[in-house]
Amino acid sequence: MWMGGSSLLRPPSKPRVRFDQRRGRPGTLGGSVHVARGYPYHEGVTSATVVAEMPGPVVELLSKALVGELTVIDRNGRFRTDPLIPFWDGRYVLMTSSILFSRKLEDIKRNPRISLSLSDPVGIRAQPFSRATIQGDARVIDDDLHQGWYRLVPLWEAKEPIIKTFLKPLQKLGLPLFWERAIIEIVPKRVLWWPDGDTTRDPQVTDVRQAAA
Amino acid sequence: MNLGHALSRLPGYPHAVLVVPDDDGYPLSVATSFRVVDGTVEVTPASTGPRAVRDTVEARLVVSHIRPYPGVGYDQRRYIELSGALSVGGPVWRFTPQAARGWDEQALSFPELCQRALPQARRYLAILSTERGREVKPQMNAGWRFFLATRLPFLTATIVPVFLGFAAAAYDHHFSIGLAALTLLGALTVHLGLNVANDIFDTLSGVDEVNFTPTKFSGGSRVLQYGLVSLRQMMALAAVFYAVAIIVGLVLVAISGLGLLWLGVAGVLISYFYTAPPLRLVHRGLGELCVALGFGPIMVLGTYFVQTGQYALRPLILSIPVAILVMLILYANEVPDRFADAKAGKRTLVVRMRPAAVIRGYVAAVAVAYLVLSAGVVFGVLPWPALISLLTIPLAYQTWKGLKAH
C-alpha cells in the first residue's frame, strides 16, 4: 500500500507516484491498485476502500508495452478496439487519446466497461514474455484537454522518448488538435495472465477487487 | 476498409486478439493464432479460464503492428479490426468476418489521418461545450495563433521584392529610410491581408475543408478548420491589415505622386480578389499570373517609384526573375493541393495541366527567370553582382526533383 486510505477518496488529479525509469515501473510502490467507494466514476466497488494487487508480471508488461489493444463498447453495444500505448502509475492503467480520435472517449463515457489486451511480443519487450488481459472500468478525464494530460508525459517519454521533441511549441503547431487530449483512467477489475504467453493454456485469473476484499 | 482487402492483409500479422462478450457485460479479449481459409478465419481455441468463450455474432478479431525504435519510439503503425460471428464448436474456432476497419500509416499518413479526423474533434468539443454550458475550444496562446493565422514566414516573399526595389533605387542614388519603412509596412500588410483573406474565402468555398494533405507551405493556415480562430476574428484581422495597407498606400501616393496610385490599387485588388468572389482569380487559373504581377513588377516598381518618383527599365527587368520565382512558390505548392483544389472547383494551373506538363512548365519558368537575369547583366541593365542569384539554381533543381516525386 502506498497511500493512506482517506486520501483515496479524492480524485487523483496529481498522483503521488514517481515513475522509476530504471526499473521500468513505479518506484517503491510495487503493483498496488487502489479503488475507492464513492469515487464517482467507478461502479461495483464493494465496501470502504479496497486495496488489491496487480500481479507483478502484468505490471512488468504494462511498464514495457508500447501497444495494447483497448476494447470499448460503442453506442450500439458493439465492441470497438483501438491500439493505444498503455501506462501504469502504480494505481491505474492510464492512456491518452487526442480529441481527433475521441470516439472511444464518447463510448467510455456511455459505458465504462473495457478490456485491454497486452499480447504483442514485438510491441512489448518484457522478459520473460507473457500475455495478459485486463478488464476494468474506465473513466475519461477531459477537464483540461490542453494541459491535463501532461502529467502522463514522464510515463510517455519513458516509452517513446521522441515525444519530447514533438511537444516543442513550434512542432505542436503542425497538428494542434492532436495535442488536445484526454486521459483514460482504468480501474482494473479482473486480470487474466498467461505466464508464457500461450493462450491455449488456462490463464491465472486475479479478480483484483476480490483479491483484497 | 474493404473486407476483402482486410482479409488479404491478415496473414501478414503473427497473431490476433479475439474479443468476445463476457458474462458480466465486459468485453473479454484474448490473443490467439489464426489462419484465413476461404473468406473465414480459423482461430486457435484460447483459454480464458472459468469464463468460457461462447458462440457470438458480436466478436471482433483485431491485428495490430508497430516497429519499435529503441530510444526513439516506434513506427509502421497499422491495425485491422474485423467484426463478425464466432463459432467455437470443433477443434478450431471459426470467425466469419462481416466488416472491417483499420489504418495503415504507410497507406494513409498520420498527418492525413489527423486531418480526416477533424470532424470528430469538433464533434467532441461540441459535446463538451453542451455538457459544460460554455464553449470548449482548443487552446493556443495569442502569439502562436497570430503566427499561424497570418502565415508570417511567408512574408519573405514580400521582403525580397521590396528590398530589390530599394536596391534598384539606391543604385540610382535615391534612398529614404522613412519612405522605405512605410513602403515595407504597406507591402507587408497587403500580404498579411491576402493571407488571411485567402483562408477566409478558401474556408467559405470549402477548399480548405476538403484538403486532407496540407503542408507547411500549402493548404492555408487551417486555424479556422482547427477552431483556433473564429471566422469573425479572421475577417476583422483581414480588415485591419487592408485598412493599414490602404492608409499607408495613400500616404505614399501623397508623398510620391499619383503615378503610384494605379500600382497600389492594382496590388490591393489583386490581393483581395485572389480568392474573394466574384472574381476568385485563383479559381480561374489566374492565381499564378496574379502572384507574379503582385510580387514582381507591382512591388519592385512600386518600391522604386516611392523612392525615385519615376518608373524605369532596370527595376522592371529586375522584377521579372523574382516575379517568376515567387510565382513558382505557389505553383509548386499547388501540386500537393491539386486533388483538394480540383474537388472544390479551384482550377489552378496545376489542376488544369497534366503532370508532365506541370513539370515542363516549372522547368520553362525557371529557365526564363535565370535567362532574364543573365540577359539583364549581359546587356548592362543589371550590375554583374546580380549573377550571384545563379547560385540558387541547385535549389531549383531540388524543387524539380520534389515535383517529379509528387
Image: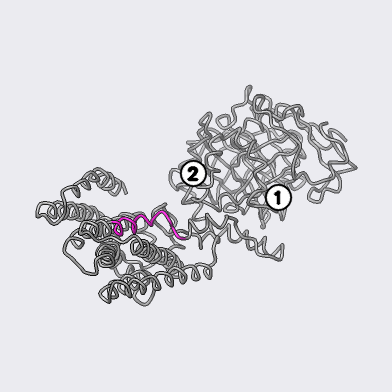
Q: In this figure, what is the number of numbered marks?
A: 2
Q: Chain of mark 2?
A: B
- Numbered label attached to residue B7: 2
Which quadrant would residue A27 be assigned to in this image?
top right
Kind of element beneath mark 1? strand
Q: Position of residue B154 (x, y in %)?
A: 38, 56
When the figure is inspected, residue A58 is found, relative to residue B309, above or below; the finding is above
Kind of element beneath mark 2? helix
Magenta part of the protein: which range? B150-163
Q: Nearer the viewer, mark 1 or mark 2?
A: 1
Q: Residues within 10 Å of mark 2 (few under 14, many from 20)?
A: many
Q: Position of residue B119 (x, y in %)?
A: 55, 60
Q: Residue furthest left?
A: B379
Q: Which residue is mark 1?
A: A141
The one of B262 and A162 positioned closer to us in this rendering:
B262
Q: Position of residue B366 (x, y in %)?
A: 21, 53
Asked if marks 1 and 2 fall on the same chain, the answer is no
Q: Residue at x 15, y 53 (%)?
A: B371
User: In the figure, is residue B65 to the left or right of B189?
Assistant: right
Q: Position of residue B20 (x, y in %)?
A: 67, 44
User: In the figure, is residue B246 to the left or right of B83?
Assistant: left
Would residue B352 be visible to someone looking at this image?
no
- Quote the CA–CA distance across marks 1 and 2: 36 Å
Q: Chain of mark 1?
A: A
Q: Quadrant of the N terminus of chain A?
A: top right
